[in-house]
Image: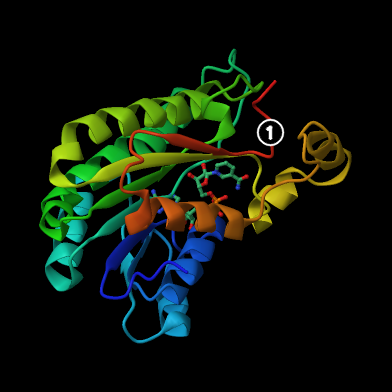
Amino acid sequence: MTDLSGLSVLITGAAGGIGTAMAERFAAAGARLALVDISAADDLAARLGPQHRAYRLDLEDPVAIADTVAQIGAEMGIDILLNNAGLGIVFPADTTDVEAWDRTMRINLRAPWLMSAAALPFLKASGRGRIVNVSSQAGVIAIADHAAYGSSKAGLILQTRVLALEWAGFGITVNAIAPTVVETPMALVGWSGEKGVKARAEIPVGRFAQPAEIAATALFLSSAEAAMITGETVMVDGGFSIR
Ligand SMILES: NC(=O)c1ccc[n+]([C@@H]2O[C@H](COP(=O)([O-])OP(=O)(O)OC[C@H]3O[C@@H](n4cnc5c(N)ncnc54)[C@H](O)[C@@H]3O)[C@@H](O)[C@H]2O)c1
């Protein structure tokens, strides 16, 4: 089992489905957590143990990102950054909702870059820095109504590769995970009933992913054993994108 004792992990979107599963998995591996979200994650921090801390941050705010990451770095260091938070607004491409597009890009694409840049001094100091970005299958293949969301997640995959290239010399790896639908409470609302049955049937393994499966992939990419993997996007999609 991967042992992250003595390491600090910053998780964005920790108050939500996949982020909370990551928090539980990384805490079980012995890491100390900085749980970052626009919503309160204090109860989660308290539940996981006294060494963990919750921070309120709006990822749309570049100044707040710089300040909060500097504070976390000073208080506990940052060895691993999990850029998990994301916004899933979908709409047809002929609906030119500029604010929805811009908000999607600010949270899904700009924030991971700003978080990573702000964390860089601490990741360098770590000597075994890790960044894991949560992209999506929608960033790899075309899905109707996903022009904004898919573009943001495709951009995140390329961002992952550029940062991996620039920062490899510091012992930092940068990778992405591209899940299919993950059974979080919110996703299950959107993919309920007939729509959900049809979507599951289109996935070769016949089911959606569990939040714990995304967390386990992030844990592996964050481990010492994964030091040779960088710039990679790991599909966790039950084979949805292989055809
Ligand atoms: N659930 C899925 O089916 C699925 C599939 C593929 C990829 N993803 C990706 O996985 C990631 C996590 O998704 P989830 O399903 O757990 O989502 P979620 O909505 O359950 O949780 C997202 C978290 O991000 C936080 N957040 C949103 N905007 C924020 C902001 N401006 N500042 C700070 N925090 C903010 C929310 O408060 C929430 O706690 C996202 O990047 C999403 O795009 C999800």
Amino acid type, mark 1: Gly
Between residues 54 and 40, which one lies in front from this camera angle? Answer: 54
Q: Residue furthest top?
A: 94
The answer to whether any part of residue 63 appears in the image is no
- Specify few, some or many for label 1: CA neighbours under 10 Å numbering under 14, 14-19, or 20 or more: some
At x 85%, y 34%, the residue is: 198
Q: Is mark 1 within 8 Å of ligand 1?
A: no
Locate residue 44, reporting x and y percent: 47, 76
Q: Is residue 138 visible?
A: yes
Tell me if residue 41 comes above or below residue 14 in the rendering. below
User: Which residue has dot 1 on it?
Assistant: 239
In-image side of 49 versus 129 (left or right): right
Look at the numbered disc 1 and give the secondary structure of its residue: loop
Q: Image point 16% across, 63% down: which residue?
A: 73
Give the answer, above or below, for where 103 lies relative to 36: above
Question: Which residue is painted at 57% across and 29% down in the image?
Answer: 138
The image position of residue 70, as x and y in percent, is: 14, 59
Quadrant showing the C terminus: top right
Q: Residue furthest bottom?
A: 50
State the residue at coordinates (35%, 72%): 31
